[in-house]
Every structure is written in structure tokens, then in C-alpha cells.
Image: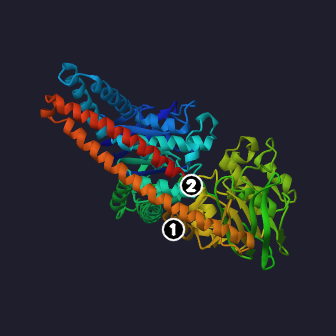
């Protein structure tokens, strides 16, 4: 399989989107596409799928290449259940299975010496060959593997798709695409709506994927773990860098440094030549040499000054004086939503200068907890104490503290009337608001622009404690880099909720994991937390945080021992059934192989015997699969 782009160009009206694009994809390619918002990343994917046609250039795709493109909620039938939707991927194999069962019934009632029997046997053999080639006996196993990996439990399988949330539909669409297993897998922001456990599974799955994977993503950690080549879309051009995202950053820095050195060197030569020409052109003795240098200067290919296309954003968070040692003391707090406790007995202390990062599944109560810390929501049980001289700057991902009708400049002027317009313009320029952009209405800003305006406001508050709720959401990849640098350099205290693993890896002193079972603190950055997740996955399930024993708990422990004994019995039974399934499938495969032999086709008695044996084996397998599903759901 090969996809080759030669000098591909595309424009929308008079506006060029992509120009002179060249790259090659093979069946082993692992490619990440990056660039600023609106640079043309998704457009590039649509050119590969054929949704868009280039204005110039050639796109060669090996005939018969299957291409799968993840779009939000794409290809899902609202009336089906989750499991039915996944089984629809294997509609042809399921049809083969249905026809084989029908032929088995017909052959059992037919005369083995008749012509119809021979025809049915030949049809059965052809269907069976196709069914086995598609690994039809593992359909349900493969469906379960992918659904479990994508965060769906057995209890979700009967759920109708129309009842699912947008995030759930996106996960299901990705699960369906992975089951389809196209030769070329195109993913546009696939990590949205995925928790850390699901991300870990997806990354490992893609590493072993048998085909080409192309990903558009702002998730730097994901790009580090899954791709071996970066395509940077910048100024309508596409440039390839070998390696993952971290290697791209290194190569990009080296490229800019080398380009700057070459540019500066050439500028010195040009300056020297021009100075010589100006001084010596009119002199008779040196006129010839001066003309020669002028000719050389005219022929010289002048280098452009290397610059990055990214916006210049300089996040800064100054403050005047530090707070007392204990910034936040949380003791025995219940995290509550509408009076209902999501998490019980949360206790920890954030000290001055620490960077504490909160993680957890969607709906675990992370944002609610931040609001309880800030006093925006009541604490019904437990106590949260804020230390002396604490000055908090709060960034909330969904809240807009400005009036949508005011301009960017007015938004800050109304909050800081003591600052001059020149001071405000200078401050806004540091957050990439220059020229006409400061006259934009707040309501017209993109998600990334609004986030930068909120950070500009936060910076002027001069907080010595930052409380941040998903601060890197909506920022493009380059702005995320700058925010990360600023938070790492910040000498104050940070309490932050984030799903940005790259940010967590670079800034966190410790990770606070929130879940329905409580709070668990992991010292170190995201890599330390990831190691814990992997160990947890290897063990099968997370261990509940130890608590002080009480008489009631001891009784619970006694019951849990009994439950563990029963669980061990179920596991033993499950292993026995799995071995029986393997034996049964092996016997079926042997019988089906015998059925396909040419000499069997003319031996009507053998045909009848094999057909009867297959019917019996299929019935036995169905019973074993039901028993396996019962035991598996009880685990």
C-alpha cells in the first residue's frame, strides 16, 4: 500500500490553503499532523479520503486501499444498541455464519446421494473458507476487547445509541473504526473525551495496528507515544520531520538556529559587498572589482529570515509576596453535587510553592472540588482552610468573565481603569492581541483567543496562587508550549485540574487522583502516575485505598474473603470453559477442513457424517459461549 502526494495544491476561492505538498505514506507509516488552527490539517485528511479534490498536483493511492476516517458520531445508527452497532462491522461474516447454519439444517434433511446435497456441501465449503479467513469465530471476542478498551462496560452493551452523550458517541465511533481495521487509519483529534486509562489502551493498540496510522492531534503526549514522523502544516506548506513530537521540537529548534546563522552570515556578506561597491564603484582602479561584486550580489539567492508561523504568546504570572507555608488544608471533605456526595473524606495539604495536579474521570467531581476550595460552593462535610496572604487567580475553562459586547481592549480597561491604553495594549500584545485584534468583540473570539484573554486578565491580578481548571483546553499546540513554560517557571503555588499529560509531566510535583473510591496521591509527574496506572491494569483492577479498620469494616473484610473464594472458583470455571471452547473450535476447524477436501465431496456418507458432527459441535459451542458470558459478567 502506498499513498503519494506530488506537488498538491488547494485553494478556496482566492485564498490558498495548501501549496506544493509532497509526502509518502506506506503500510507501516505512523504520522502525526500538526499546525496552527486553520492551517489546513483536516483539509489534508479530506484530500486523502477524496472528499476534496486538489486544484493542482497528483495524489496516487494504491488500487483497493481501504481508508477509514474518524469523524465525530460518524457511521452510527441511532436505533441500534452499542453491541449491535459493533456487530454490524462484521455483517458479511455474520451473513456467512447464518447461511452455513441454514445449509447445515438443509443438508441434515437432504439425501446424501442427491445432487442437491453435493451442491449444498460445495456452497458450505466456500462460505466456511470465507468465514475462517475473516476469523469469524472470534467476532464477539474482538468486539468485547475493543469496547472494554474504549471504556465501555458489559452493562453498556444493550444501551441504544440515541441515548448516548456526544463524548460516548465519539468513543464508539472510534471503537467501530478500530474494529473495521482499514489499511489506512485517519484520526482527527482522537483523544478528545478519553480518560487516561482509555488513552493508555488506545496508544498500545495503535502501536500494534497492522496498517498506516495518520493522526491530527494537539495532544503532545499522544504524538510522542504513537508516531514516528511529524508533518508540519505551516504557511500553506507541509514539511516532514522524522521522529515523534519531542524529536520534532528538537529538529525544529536546530533548523531555526542553523537558518538564523546562515541568514546572519549572508547579511554580513551582503553588507560587506554593498559597502565595498559604494566606496569603490567610482574609482577607476577598483571599478572593475566593484562591478564584479555587484554582479555577484545580483545573482545571490537572498535567504529569508527564519521565523516560526506561530503567534508570539508570552504568558507571565508575576506576584508581589508569597503566602504562608500551608496554602490549602483539606480535611475530611466530601465532594458534593446538589447535596449528593461523589467522593468522601478528601484530605491533603498544598504547601507554598507546590504544583498539585488533580486528575480523574469525567464526572468525578474535580471542577466541583475546585469551587469548594474557592468557597464558590458550600462544603457540607469537612473543612477547607486557606492560608494567610493567599491571593488566588482562578481560571475556569467554561466561564467567561467578560461582557460579549465589549472589545478586547475594553474588557481589560473596564477591570483595570487605572492602567493607560498604552499599558493595556502592551500587555495584550504579550498574549498575541495586536493591531485590529484588540478591537474584536469578546463574543467574536475563538475558544483559544478567549482563553488567552482570560490569562491576560489573570496575569494582571498578580496572584501568588493559581487555581486552574483545564487551562490548556482550546489553546493550539504552540500556545500550549508557552503556557507550559510559564507554569513551570512560576514561583507561586498551583492547584490544577488537567487532562493534558504533557503539561502534567512537565509541571506536577504530585498527582491527586479523584475517583468514586476516594483520593490517591502519587508523588512525581505524570510518568510516575502512568507507571501506577500500568501496574493497576496489569493487576486487573485498582486497589482501594487503605483505611483504618472498624468493627463494621472487619465484617466487610470477612465477607470480602468469602467473595474472593467464590471469585477464585469462578475464575477456575472460566478457565475450564475457555479450554473447552478452544477444543471445540479446534475440532470444528478440523471437520471443516475435512469437508473442503475434494474426495469428500463425492463421498455422500462422509459428507453426512461431517455435517452432523458440525451441527453437534456448533450446538455445543453455543452452549459453552453462553456459559462463558455468564461467568465473565460475574467476574
Quarter of the rendering containing residue 610? top left
**The label number, if any, that marks residue 535 in the structure image:** 1
Q: Seen in the image, is 388 located left or right of residue 598? A: right
Residue 33 locus on image (x, y percent)? 46, 49
391, above or below 433, in the image: below
Residue 436 locus on image (x, y percent)? 70, 45
- Please name which of the two marks, 2 or 1, marks the residue nearer to the observer: 1
* Label 1 Cα crowd, 10 Å radius (few <14 / some 14-19 / many 20+): few
Q: Quadrant of the N terminus?
A: top left
In the image, 484 versus 279, the foreground residue is: 484
Residue 622 locus on image (x, y percent)? 41, 40
Between discs 2 and 1, the one toward the N terminus: 2
169, above or below 415, in the image: above
Q: Seen in the image, is 368 located left or right of residue 103? A: right
Residue that label 2 marks: 477
281, above or below 148, in the image: below
Quarter of the rendering containing residue 197? bottom right
- Measured in 3D between alpha carbons, the distance from the residue under mark 2 to the one under mark 1, in whole angstroms, is 30 Å
- Which residue appears farthest toward the top when viewing the image? 115
Residue 418 locus on image (x, y percent)? 87, 59
Amino acid at each position: 500500500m502506498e499513498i503519494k502526494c506530488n506537488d498538491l495544491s488547494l485553494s478556496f476561492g482566492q485564498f490558498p490553503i495548501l501549496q506544493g505538498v509532497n509526502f509518502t505514506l506506506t503500510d507501516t507509516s505512523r504520522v502525526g499532523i500538526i499546525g496552527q488552527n486553520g492551517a489546513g490539517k483536516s483539509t489534508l485528511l479530506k484530500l486523502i479520503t477524496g472528499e476534496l479534490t486538489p486544484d493542482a498536483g497528483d495524489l496516487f493511492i494504491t488500487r483497493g486501499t481501504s481508508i477509514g476516517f474518524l469523524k465525530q458520531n460518524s457511521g452510527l445508527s441511532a436505533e441500534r444498541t452499542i453491541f449491535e452497532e459493533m456487530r454490524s462491522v462484521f455483517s458479511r461474516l455474520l451473513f456467512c455464519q447464518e447461511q452455513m447454519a441454514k445449509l447445515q439444517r438443509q443438508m441434515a434433511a437432504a439425501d446424501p446421494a442427491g445432487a442437491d446435497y453435493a451442491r449444498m456441501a460445495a456452497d458450505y465449503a466456500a462460505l466456511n473458507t470465507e468465514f475462517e479467513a475473516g476469523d469469524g469465530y472470534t467476532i464477539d471476542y474482538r468486539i468485547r476487547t475493543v469496547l472494554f478498551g474504549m471504556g465501555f462496560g458489559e452493562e453498556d452493551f444493550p444501551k441504544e445509541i440515541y441515548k448516548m452523550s456526544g463524548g460516548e458517541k465519539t468513543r464508539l465511533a472510534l471503537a467501530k473504526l478500530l474494529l473495521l481495521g482499514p489499511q489506512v487509519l485517519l484520526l482527527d483529534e482522537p483523544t478528545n473525551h478519553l480518560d487516561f486509562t482509555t488513552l493508555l489502551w488506545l496508544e498500545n493498540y495503535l502501536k500494534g495496528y497492522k496498517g498506516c496510522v495518520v493522526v491530527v492531534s494537539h495532544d503532545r503526549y499522544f504524538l510522542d507515544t504513537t508516531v514516528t514522523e511529524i508533518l508540519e502544516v505551516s504557511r500553506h506548506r507541509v514539511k516532514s520531520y522524522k521522529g515523534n513530537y519531542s524529536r520534532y521540537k528538537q529538529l525544529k529548534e536546530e533548523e531555526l538556529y542553523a537558518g538564523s546563522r546562515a541568514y546572519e552570515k549572508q547579511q554580513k556578506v551582503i553588507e560587506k559587498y554593498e559597502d565595498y561597491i559604494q566606496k569603490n564603484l567610482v574609482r577607476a582602479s577598483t571599478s572593475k572589482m566593484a562591478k564584479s561584486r555587484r554582479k555577484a550580489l545580483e545573482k545571490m539567492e537572498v535567504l529569508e529570515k527564519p521565523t516560526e508561523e506561530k503567534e508570539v504568546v508570552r504568558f507571565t504570572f508575576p506576584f508581589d509576596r508569597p503566602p504562608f507555608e500551608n496554602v490549602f488544608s483539606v480535611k475530611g471533605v466530601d465532594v458534593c453535587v446538589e447535596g449528593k456526595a461523589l467522593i468522601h473524606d478528601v484530605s491533603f495539604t498544598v504547601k507554598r510553592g507546590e504544583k498539585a495536579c488533580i486528575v480523574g474521570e469525567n464526572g468525578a467531581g474535580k471542577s466541583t472540588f475546585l469551587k469548594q476550595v474557592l468557597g464558590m460552593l458550600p462544603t457540607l462535610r469537612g473543612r477547607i482552610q486557606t492560608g494567610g496572604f493567599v491571593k488566588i487567580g482562578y481560571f475556569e475553562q467554561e466561564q467567561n468573565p467578560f461582557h460579549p459586547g465589549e472589545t478586547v481592549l475594553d474588557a481589560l480597561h473596564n477591570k483595570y481603569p487605572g492602567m493607560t491604553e498604552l499599558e493595556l495594549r502592551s500587555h495584550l500584545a504579550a498574549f498575541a492581541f495586536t493591531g485590529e485584534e484588540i478591537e474584536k468583540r469578546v463574543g467574536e473570539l475563538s475558544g483559544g483567543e478567549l482563553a488567552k484573554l482570560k490569562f491576560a486578565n489573570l496575569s494582571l491580578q498578580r496572584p501568588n496562587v493559581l487555581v486552574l481548571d483545564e487551562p490548556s483546553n482550546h489553546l493550539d499546540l504552540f500556545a500550549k508550549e508557552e503556557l507550559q513554560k510559564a507554569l513551570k517557571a512560576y514561583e507561586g503555588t498551583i492547584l490544577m485540574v488537567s487532562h493534558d499529560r504533557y503539561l502534567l509531566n512537565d509541571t506536577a510535583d504530585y498527582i491527586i487522583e479523584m475517583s468514586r473510591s476516594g483520593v490517591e496521591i502519587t508523588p512525581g509527574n505524570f510518568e510516575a502516575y502512568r507507571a501506577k496506572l500500568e501496574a493497576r491494569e496489569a493487576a486487573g483492577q485498582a486497589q482501594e485505598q487503605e483505611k483504618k479498620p472498624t468493627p463494621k469494616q472487619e465484617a466487610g473484610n470477612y465477607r470480602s474473603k468469602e467473595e474472593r473464594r467464590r471469585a477464585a472458583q469462578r475464575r477456575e470455571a472460566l478457565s475450564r470453559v475457555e479450554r473447552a471452547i478452544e477444543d471445540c473450535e479446534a475440532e470444528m476447524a478440523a471437520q471443516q477442513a475435512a469437508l473442503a477436501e475434494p474426495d469428500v465431496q463425492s463421498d455422500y456418507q462422509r459428507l453426512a457424517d461431517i455435517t452432523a458432527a458440525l451441527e453437534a459441535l456448533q450446538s455445543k459451542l453455543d452452549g459453552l459461549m453462553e456459559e462463558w458470558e455468564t461467568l465473565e459478567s460475574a467476574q
